[in-house]
C-alpha cells in the first residue's frame, strides 16, 4: 500500500467438541428427574415443566460447534480502520446450561452472540 498504509486480514475458525457445563453434569442421572410427582417436589430440584409431568428428560451434554470470524482493514502508525463479521454462519451454539434459576423453572442454555457485522476505527495521539 502507499503512504505507509498496511492492509491486514484475519480469518479465524474455532471448533469446540462436545462438553459439559460443569463436572456435576456428567453424573449418572443428570437430565432425568423422576421426583416431579413427589409431594415434596418444591424442595427438590425439578427440571422444568409443570408438576403434572412425571418425568422430564434432557441431554446435559452440550453439542459441538464451530464458529468463524473475518476481519480486514488498513492501518498506519497513527490510525486503523477495519470491517468485521463475527459468527459468519450465524451459528446458535449452546455454551453452557443456564443455572440462573437452578434449573427449577426451565432447562435453558447460555448461547453465543448472533452474526455481528461492524466497523472499527482507532487513532493514536
Image (cartoon, rainbow, N blue to C red):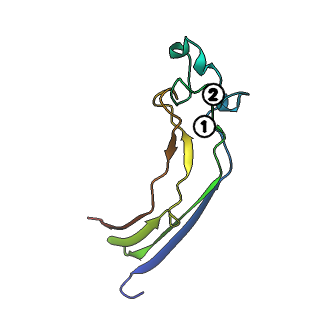
Q: List the single residue furthest toward the left.
A: 125
Determine which residue is flagged by label 1: 21
Q: Quadrant of the C terminus?
A: bottom left
Q: Which residue is nearer to you in this view: 41 or 82?
A: 41
Residue 58 marker? none
Q: Position of residue 1 (x, y in %)?
A: 42, 87
SS type, badge 2: loop
Question: Callout 2: few (<14), some (14-19), or many (20+) C-alpha neighbours within 10 Å?
Answer: some
Q: Residue 30 appears in which quarter of the rendering?
A: top right
The answer to whether residue 49 is above or below residue 10 is above
Distance from label 1 to label 2 (Cα)?
A: 22 Å
Q: Which residue is nearer to you in this view: 119 or 91?
A: 91
Q: Which residue is nearer to you in this view: 52 or 8?
A: 52
Q: Position of residue 116 (x, y in %)?
A: 41, 63
Of the residues under marks 1 and 2, which one precedes in the sequence?
1
Q: Position of residue 6 (x, y in %)?
A: 43, 79
Residue occupying image coordinates x 55% and y 16%: 41
Q: Which residue is nearer to you in this view: 23 or 2?
A: 23
Residue 55 marker? 2
The answer to whether residue 113 is above or below residue 96 is below
SS type, badge 1: loop
Residue occupying image coordinates x 62% and y 19%: 35
Number of disc labels: 2
The answer to whether residue 1 is above or below residue 19 is below
Q: Is residue 115 found left or right of 125 in the rendered image?
A: right
Amino acid at each position: 500500500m502507499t503512504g505507509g498504509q498496511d492492509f491486514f486480514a484475519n480469518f479465524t475458525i474455532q471448533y469446540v467438541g462436545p462438553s459439559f457445563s460443569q463436572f456435576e453434569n456428567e453424573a449418572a442421572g443428570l437430565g432425568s428427574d423422576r421426583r416431579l410427582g413427589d409431594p415434596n417436589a418444591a424442595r427438590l430440584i425439578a427440571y422444568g415443566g409443570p408438576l403434572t409431568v412425571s418425568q422430564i428428560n434432557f441431554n446435559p451434554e452440550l453439542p459441538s460447534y464451530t464458529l468463524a470470524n473475518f476481519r480486514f482493514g488498513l492501518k498506519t502508525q497513527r490510525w486503523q480502520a477495519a470491517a468485521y463479521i463475527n459468527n459468519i454462519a450465524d451459528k446458535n451454539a449452546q455454551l453452557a446450561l443456564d443455572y440462573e434459576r437452578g434449573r427449577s423453572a426451565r432447562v435453558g442454555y447460555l448461547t453465543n452472540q448472533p452474526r455481528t457485522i461492524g466497523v472499527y476505527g482507532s487513532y493514536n495521539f
